[in-house]
Structures are given as C-alpha cells and as structure tokens.
C-alpha cells in the first residue's frame, strides 16, 4: 500500500461489498413476497426497508472508501488523522448493525417501535430514511468526522485539486442535505416536501456531483488525458447536474399538495436532467478512445459502463415519465420502481464497482490482475438488471393502463394481471445474485491470483 | 473559458439555483395551509401512528412509498370508514387473503389513522390521482346493472375479475346463497348474518333498488 490511509479505504470497501450481498439477497426475499406475502418471517415493509437501506449505506460506504483513496492520492500525503478515520469506520459499522437489528425486532414485534424522547426508537417510518433519530445523529456525526478528516488533509497539503475540491464539495452538500430529514412536521405535505430535499438532492444532486468527480479521477488514472481538460469537463458536468437537478426537484412536487406552478418548474428542469449525464457519456467515450493508456481494461470498461448506464437509468428511464402530463398517470406505479432500479445500478452501483477495480489492485500493490471473473460478474449483473427493469416496466405499463386508465382495483391488478411479471422478476433476481456473488468473491481475490489470459479477457 | 472560470460558474451558478429553490420553498409554504384542511390533534396523532407502523413500507401516500399495497391518499373516499376501521384492527379477519399482517392496531389507533387519512383525502393534489378516462364500465363493475354500479359495489367486490378485493369475490354468489331473503337481510344488516362482517348496512336503499340488486345478484352463478 502506497499510503497507510488506504487501509481505511479498504475497510469501507469491504463493508460496502458485504452489505451489497445482503442487499440483493433481501431484495430477492422482497420480490418473492410480491407473489407470496407471508413467505418470510417478517413482512414486506421490513424486507423492503432492509433492501433499500442496505443499498444507501453500502453506496455511501463505497463513496467514503473511494474518497479515502482519492484524497491521499491527490494530496500526496496521509490522512490528517488515521485513528479518527478508523474510529469513524467502526462507529459507522456498529450504528448500521444496531439499526438493522432494530428493523428485524420491529418486523417480529411491530409494537416494539415505541416513542422515546419524542422520537420512534426502531424505525422512523419514512421511506429511505427509516433510520431512527438517534441513528440519524450518529450518521451525521460520522459524516462530519469524515468531512473534517478529509478537509484537514486537503488543507495541510496546500494543494487542492479540482477533483478533490469537487469530491469534498459533493460530500459537504450530501451531509447538509441530510438535515432536512431530521425533524418532525405534523403536515404530511410538508413532511414529504422536506423529505424530497434529502432524497432528491442526494441522488440527483450531491451523489451525481460525487460521481462526476470520481469519473474524472478514474479517467485520469486510466488514460493520458491531461488533468486540465478532465477537470474542465468535470466542472461543466457537475454544474449542469446542479443547474438542472436543483429545480428538477419540482417533479416530486406535482401531486403532494404543493402549488401547481411546480408542474412547470419540475417539467422544464427535470426534462433537462439527462443532459449532464449524456455529456458524461460523451466525455468518457471520447477520453477513452483518444488517450487510452492503461492495462486495467476492466477498470476502464466499468467506468465507461457506469457513464452509459447512468444516462440510461437515471436519465432516459427518468425522463420518459417526468412530464406532468405523463406522470399524472404513471406516478406511484411500478414504472417508478423500474427507473429506480436502473438508475441506482448505473449511476452508483457500477460507479463503486468501477472504483473497486481501479483502486484495489493498486492498494494490493499489483499492476495486473485476473479480470475474467470481473467481466463475467458484470455481464451477469447487467443482463439480469436489464431484464428486471424491462419486466417491472411492463408491470408498470399494465398497472397504469388497468388501474389508472380503466379504474381497476390496485390489488386486483397486482394479483390477477401482474403475477407473471413478479415471477420473472424473482427469477432474474436469482441470476443477479449470482453476478453479485462473483463480484464479492472477486473483491477478496483481486491481485491475489495468477494473471492468466482467458478467452473473455482477450475478447474484451 | 479557463478552468477557473468554469469552476466559478459551477460554484456560483449552483448557489444561485439553490437560492431560487429556497425562494420557491418560502412561497410554497406560504400557500400550503390553504390547500389542506386544518390539522387537528387527532390528525397529527394519526400521522404519528402512520410512521410508527411504517405504513409507507408497503403503501404509498400522495403516490410516494412502496408500491406493494394500494395508495392511501384518497382511501377514505373509496371504502367505508367502518370497513377501514375493522380492516386496520384485524385485516385477516375481514379478508383472509389480505396481504396486510395483523399489526396490533387498537380501535383508538384505527380512529386516529382514519382521521389522518381523511385529512390527506382532502388535500389539493392538483387533480391526482386522475379519474380513469377509459373506466366508466370497468370501474363501475361493467355489469350493466344500475344499482350495482350506482352503489359502487365493485370498489369492494369482484365479478369475473373486475372489482376490488376488500370484500369477497361474488362471481358465483348465487350458488352459495340462492335465497333472495338471505340477500335482503344481508343488505339491511350484514353483521346479522356474518357477525364479523366489515360491510356497511345498505338498509337505506329503496325497495325498488334493493329488488333490482337482489335480482342481479341471483343471476351470478
């Protein structure tokens, strides 16, 4: 390891990868519960909460791991405080595990979610941010320690690169935007208004800024493209992300009880949101084509795949139902689920996987590593995810037609007309898990196996 | 434009967008209270219970949530409150095939949850969810029977795959209950025949309407 600080990055990556496996296994449980609700020992709400919370936490840990790699690398020095980073890591792990135990207890005994000091003890009952208030505070403290440590490292080095500054700016924005989710309001309209600040300004704001910075970093590591040029395009991309995404939040304010001018604001700005994602694709393809210089073909392949699927999932699958005239019919249907799956896969899952394949070989001190399993894992995951997304989109179209246009009952459509969609989704959930298992196994093996040229590698 | 210029554009441009968002937020909040009924203590307690039981983990509200179970925004307009209360307290007793588990909700808690859901049903949501444009037949049951459609029976009952799942499927109800007197009694007071029935009484219907409905139900074999 070039820097001792990279041990922290490895810790975060390891925890992230293990949580990824948990996320997809529990996702399969939730998929089966669509067909047979009583199949597991706790109800769907708990499996869904675990599925999504594990996703958010492992991606956050992946982003933190990536930052702990990038900041020493960019600043040319160790972290300001390695013990502080170690403490932050273990505090995060313990908090997450206690929260998970709490969710499971609630699944077994719904009445256990009692109110303590004015807040719910086990589950706040708010989608995506179910973690109870005490855990919110721990997560915020963890994020602040993380920010302080990285910011101090940056200032000590007296060399603040564009990538590093943007990365930390994104992390600061992410931390600040967690705060609007940390208070109670008696109006459900206001509740959802602030809740979207957290959810939307995270995934379509702060996280995309971080993704833009990491894409520039990955391209810099893997190509000969000059930093000056990469950082310039990074600024253009993240600027467009926030110019469109900040007011693009309006597409969540169409139907929740907010004034109808949001139909215009949301419609216009969210229609523009795919543009920066398309620029990222163009940037990645152009740089890769013109200045390719690496032996880490898999890393470059994944970085480019991330850019492409970010555009397809977050951009294209979002924009198809973002206009108010369409969204009025599709809002709250499985079409949103399809968009969510492909967007998270492309924008963030592939981003972290790419970062793993680019940084872990270096941290393990190898120049080359066996790539075949990484390619196989990618294709198992990608084909399965594409199938899952098509299947759920189909279910959403049937639901939109039968429930929204014809007026049939929700449960009737779900149970009588969409059953085969749920079955096929579960089948491709299994194949997705196979791909993730390959990745998790490979994570522990990268750089530890002899490099042998395989058919899939030489083809790639 | 050099890197510094683009960076400044990013920083200050984003800040400007954020300021616009804050201004719109202030304006929005100045209008929200007039777009929804007053929040009583009962509504607030109901909302707290909504969170306590993690209802969003399966349902959606204002279309946001988990897509596993029906949207709750306008539920009090769709099903009778008496039914809703019984269902919340023990869904499996009302409908053995219900996916909703028994959460231990008390009568008092159910009242508060219903008060909260009644509040959400009256929020001005810019016309969402829309009325089904193709659905006058299907959503009314498509039976062609005026009394059946007028009383919105299909919001709870299914005939030939069309209708709601809150009540039993009545595609073949005449085979189970061929006696018109049974249906008359059942319509007047469902609990007098099925003690745990969550169906509200329809004694208020005129004799003509009742006869028309019973004649129709007896054709369902």
Image (cartoon, coloured by chain):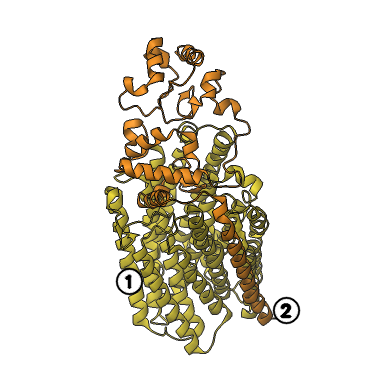
Chain colours: A yellow, B orange
Residue B77 located left or right of residue A22: right
Q: Secondary structure at mark 2?
A: loop
Q: Does the CB distance between marks 1 and 2 fall below 8 Å?
A: no
Q: Position of residue A137 (x, y in %)?
A: 37, 69
Nearer the observer, disc 1 or disc 2?
A: 1
Q: Position of residue A415 (x, y in %)?
A: 45, 33
Q: Quadrant of the N terminus of chain A?
A: bottom left
Q: Residues within 10 Å of mark 1 (few under 14, many from 20)?
A: some
Badge 2 crowding class, 10 Å Cα cut-off, few under 14, some 14 to 19, many 20 or more, is: few
Alpha carbon of mark 1 to alpha carbon of mark 2: how far? 44 Å
Confirm whether residue A441 shows in the render.
no
Comparing A155 with A368, the one in front is A155
Residue that mark 2 sits on: B1
Please state, as top left, top right, bottom left or bottom right, where the C terminus of chain A lies in the image. Answer: bottom right
Horizontal and vertical percent position of residue B104: 29, 43
- In the image, what residue occupies the spot 66% across and 82% down? B4
Label 1 marks a residue whose chain is A
**Residues at marks 1 and 2, common chain?**
no
How far from the left and from the top, in percent, is residue A120?
A: 33, 58
| Chain letter behind tag 2 | B
* A22 lies above or below B131: below
Q: Depth check: give the residue in front, B35 or B182.
A: B35
Q: Which mark is residue B72?
A: none
The residue closer to the viewer here, A340 or A378, is A340
Label 1: which residue? A91
For residue B117, side relative to residue B85 (left or right) = right
Judged from the image, the secondary structure of the residue bearing numbered disc 1 is helix
């Amino acid at each position: 390891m070039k820097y001792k600080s990279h041990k922290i990055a490895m810790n975060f990556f390891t925890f992230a990868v293990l949580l990824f496996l948990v996320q997809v296994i529990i996702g399969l449980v939730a998929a089966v519960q669509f067909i047979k609700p009583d199949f597991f020992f706790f109800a769907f709400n708990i499996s869904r909460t675990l599925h999504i919370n594990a996703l958010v936490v492992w991606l956050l840990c992946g982003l933190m791991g990536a930052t702990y790699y990038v900041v020493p690398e960019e600043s040319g020095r160790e972290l300001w405080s390695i013990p502080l980073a170690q403490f932050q890591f273990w505090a995060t792990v313990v908090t997450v595990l206690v929260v998970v135990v709490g969710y499971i207890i609630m699944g077994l005994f719904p009445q256990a979610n009692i109110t303590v000091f004015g807040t719910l003890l086990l589950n706040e009952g708010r989608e995506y941010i179910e973690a109870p208030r005490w855990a919110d505070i721990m997560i915020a403290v963890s994020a602040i320690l993380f920010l302080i440590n990285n910011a101090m490292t940056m200032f000590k080095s007296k060399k603040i690169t564009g990538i590093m500054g943007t990365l930390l700016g994104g992390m600061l924005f992410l931390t600040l935007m967690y705060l609007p989710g940390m208070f109670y309001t008696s109006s459900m309209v206001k509740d959802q208004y602030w809740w979207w600040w957290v959810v939307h300004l995270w995934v379509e704001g702060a996280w995309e800024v971080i993704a833009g910075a990491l894409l520039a970093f990955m391209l810099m590591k893997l190509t000969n493209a000059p930093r000056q040029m990469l950082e310039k395009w990074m600024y253009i991309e993240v600027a467009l992300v926030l110019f469109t995404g900040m007011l693009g939040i309006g597409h969540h304010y169409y139907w929740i009880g907010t004034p109808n001018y949001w139909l215009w604001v949301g419609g216009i700005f969210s229609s523009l949101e795919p543009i920066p994602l398309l620029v990222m694709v163009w940037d990645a393809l152009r740089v890769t084509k013109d200045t390719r210089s690496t032996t880490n073909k898999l890393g470059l392949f994944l970085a480019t795949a991330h850019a492409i699927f970010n555009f397809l999932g977050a951009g294209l699958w979002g924009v198809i139902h973002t206009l108010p005239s369409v969204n009025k019919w599709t809002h709250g249907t499985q079409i949103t689920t399809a968009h969510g799956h492909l967007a998270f896969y492309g924008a963030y899952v592939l981003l972290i996987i790419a970062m793993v394949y680019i940084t872990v070989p270096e941290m393990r001190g190898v120049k080359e590593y066996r790539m075949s399993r990484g390619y196989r894992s990618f294709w198992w995951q990608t084909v399965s995810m594409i199938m899952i997304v098509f299947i759920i989109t189909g279910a959403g179209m049937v639901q939109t037609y039968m429930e929204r246009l014809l007026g049939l009952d929700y449960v009737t459509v779900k149970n009588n007309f969409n059953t085969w969609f749920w079955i096929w989704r579960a089948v491709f959930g299994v194949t997705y898990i196979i791909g993730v298992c390959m990745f998790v196994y490979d994570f522990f093996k990268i750089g530890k196996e002899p490099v042998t040229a395989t058919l899939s590698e030489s083809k790639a | 434009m050099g890197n510094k210029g683009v960076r400044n554009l990013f920083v200050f441009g984003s800040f400007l967008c954020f300021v616009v968002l804050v201004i719109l937020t202030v304006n929005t909040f100045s209008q929200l209270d007039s777009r929804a009924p007053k929040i009583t203590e009962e509504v607030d307690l109901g909302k707290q219970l909504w969170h306590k039981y993690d209802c969003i983990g399966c349902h959606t509200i204002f279309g946001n949530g988990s897509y596993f179970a029906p949207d709750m925004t306008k539920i009090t307009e769709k099903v009778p409150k008496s039914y809703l209360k019984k269902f919340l307290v023990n869904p499996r007793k009302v409908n053995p095939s219900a996916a909703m588990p028994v959460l231990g909700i008390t009568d008092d808690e159910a009242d508060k949850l219903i008060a909260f859901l009644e509040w959400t049903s009256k929020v001005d949501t810019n016309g969402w969810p829309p009325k089904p444009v193709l659905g006058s037949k299907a959503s009314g049951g498509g039976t062609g029977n005026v009394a059946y459609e007028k009383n919105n029976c299909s919001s709870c009952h299914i005939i030939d795959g069309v209708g709601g799942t809150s009540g039993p499927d009545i595609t073949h109800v005449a085979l189970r209950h061929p006696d018109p007197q049974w249906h008359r009694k059942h319509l007047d007071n469902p609990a007098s025949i099925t003690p745990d029935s969550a169906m509200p009484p329809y004694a208020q219907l005129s004799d003509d309407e009742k006869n028309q409905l019973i004649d129709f139900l007896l054709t369902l074999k």
